[in-house]
């Protein structure tokens, strides 16, 4: 029982990394939903290849699936280039059409085979350790570990060998073309890799989890860093954490493994969305409040300078006047005053405010720079 649990966790971790690596480039290129389209439409490639070879374990099924993935990409791009329809609508037209044809073909001609649409969507992660690879009488472990490991190696080699090309074509396709790199070729190579990854993870984890792994961890990483190498590392990290915590959560509460992993992955994204040090909502809120405080302090210094050495100075420099004149709340006014005092811009004597030499220079500088 423990061995089977280790196998399930290992499969989930390997598949998560497999999907996260190409998913980074999908997110950067604004093609995240293509993973959804490919993950569903390659079922038609599997079905058509099965009708040819009549063997569910034939490697030609993978070939058919990859080719169908490329057909999906080509069909979507052709609709977009026609300028009659936008990309999101093109994706929404193409993959349901191909997926529906596959479902009809399965129901009509292959309903007696182990080719189930539910397996494609939800996977059989809990049963994957029992589908083992046997060679010369030896049990070499779950097939899913071997297949996903091979695909992981392919993905890593692809990114290592074509890192510069992928980077240039993702961020600046025009410059990539100028230096002799074909963005179109890299695009279809990447989509072929996505198709291969999706079909390799079909029976083990299902297309829903494949889509989640390809989109959510890279999206989480994108909120933390814009540097490609760091984004790849963070994406793999989030994918692994989602797989480990999701499986542990499902195992402890006897829940769906795939559903738990997706929920944990979404929860991690939500945390990053809130607390990312670069663009999280909490960080942006604090940054906005800090800018508001600094700007208000500048206004206060200018206000005090404009009434300095005038007959209205005693009245205008009072805290009560700042509250009414600036239309600030009492608490915010006190924050502005406290921050200005801490910066050495002014001093407070009972209810009156007085500019320091530094505050006076700061006010003059702000007036001159307007």
Image: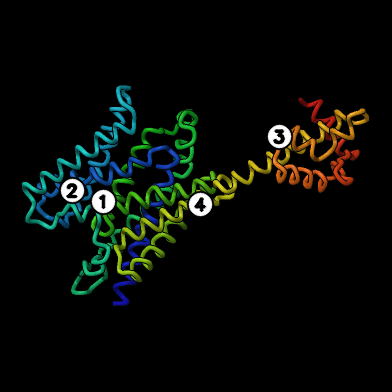
Q: Position of residue 212 (x, y in %)?
A: 36, 51
What x and y, as percent, mark residue 106? 11, 48
- Answer above or below: position of 182 versus 194: above
Please rate how many residues cluster around mark 1, counting C-alpha atoms within 10 Å: few if below 14, some from 14 to 19, many from 20: many
Q: CA distance from mark 1 to mark 2?
A: 9 Å
* Residue that extends furthest to the bottom in the rendered view of this protein: 1
* Quadrant occupied by the N terminus: bottom left
Q: Which residue is at 13% across, 49% downward?
A: 50
Return the residue nearer the eye: 256 or 242: 256
**Mark before the other along the chain sequence, 4 or 2:** 2
Instruction: Bin the neighbour count of mark 2 within 10 Å (Cα to Cα): few under 14, some 14-19, many 20 and up.
Output: many
Task: Give the residue displayed 48% in from the left and 40% down from the top.
Answer: 167
Q: Disc 1 marks which residue?
A: 199
Q: CA distance from mark 4 to mark 1?
A: 30 Å
In this figure, which residue is indicated by the disc labeled 2? Answer: 46
Q: Is residue 203 left or right of residue 88?
A: left
* Secondary structure category for the residue under label 3: loop
Secondary structure under tag 2 reads: helix
Q: Position of residue 262 (x, y in %)?
A: 36, 56
| Towards the viewer: 314 or 252 | 314
Q: Is residue 264 above or below residue 97?
A: below
| Residue that label 3 marks | 327
The percent coordinates of residue 157 (x first, y second) are: 40, 52
Task: Please identify the quadrant where the C terminus is shown.
Answer: top right
Between residue 10 and residue 337, name the one nearer to us: 337
Mark 4 and mark 2 residues within 8 Å of each other at the beta carbon: no
């Amino acid at each position: 029982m423990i061995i089977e649990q280790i196998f399930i966790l290992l499969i989930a971790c390997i598949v998560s990394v497999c999907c996260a690596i190409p998913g980074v480039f999908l997110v950067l290129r604004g093609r995240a939903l293509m993973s959804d389209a490919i993950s569903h439409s390659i079922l038609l490639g599997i079905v058509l290849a099965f009708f040819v070879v009549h063997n569910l374990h034939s490697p030609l099924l993978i070939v058919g699936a990859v080719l169908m993935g490329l057909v999906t990409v080509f069909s979507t791009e052709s609709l977009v280039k026609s300028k009659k329809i936008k990309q999101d609508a093109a994706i929404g037209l193409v993959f349901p059409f191909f997926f529906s044809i596959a479902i009809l073909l399965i129901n009509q001609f292959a309903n007696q085979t182990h080719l189930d649409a539910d397996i494609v969507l939800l996977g059989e992660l809990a049963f994957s350790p029992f589908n083992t690879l046997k060679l010369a009488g030896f049990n070499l472990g779950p097939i899913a570990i071997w297949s996903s490991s091979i695909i992981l190696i392919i993905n890593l080699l692809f990114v290592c060998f074509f890192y510069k090309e992928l980077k240039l074509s993702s961020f600046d396709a025009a410059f990539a073309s100028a230096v002799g790199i074909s963005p179109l070729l890299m695009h279809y190579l990447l989509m072929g890799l996505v198709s291969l990854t999706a079909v390799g993870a079909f029976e083990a984890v299902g297309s829903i989890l494949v889509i989640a792994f390809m989109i959510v961890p890279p999206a989480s990483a994108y909120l933390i860093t814009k540097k490609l190498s760091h984004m790849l590392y963070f994406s793999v990290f989030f994918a692994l954490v989602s797989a480990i915590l999701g499986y542990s959560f499902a195992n402890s509460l006897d829940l769906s493994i795939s559903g738990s992993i997706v929920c944990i992955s979404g929860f991690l994204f939500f945390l990053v969305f809130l607390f990312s040090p670069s663009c999280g909502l909490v960080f942006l809120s604090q940054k906005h409040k800090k800018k508001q405080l600094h700007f208000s302090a500048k206004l206060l210094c200018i206000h005090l300078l404009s009434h300095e050495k005038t007959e209205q100075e005693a009245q205008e420099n009072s805290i009560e006047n700042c509250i009414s004149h600036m239309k600030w709340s009492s608490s915010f006014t006190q924050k502005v005053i406290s921050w200005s005092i801490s910066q050495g811009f002014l001093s407070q004597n009972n209810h009156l405010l007085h500019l320091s030499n530094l505050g006076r220079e700061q006010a003059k500088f702000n007036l001159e720079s307007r």
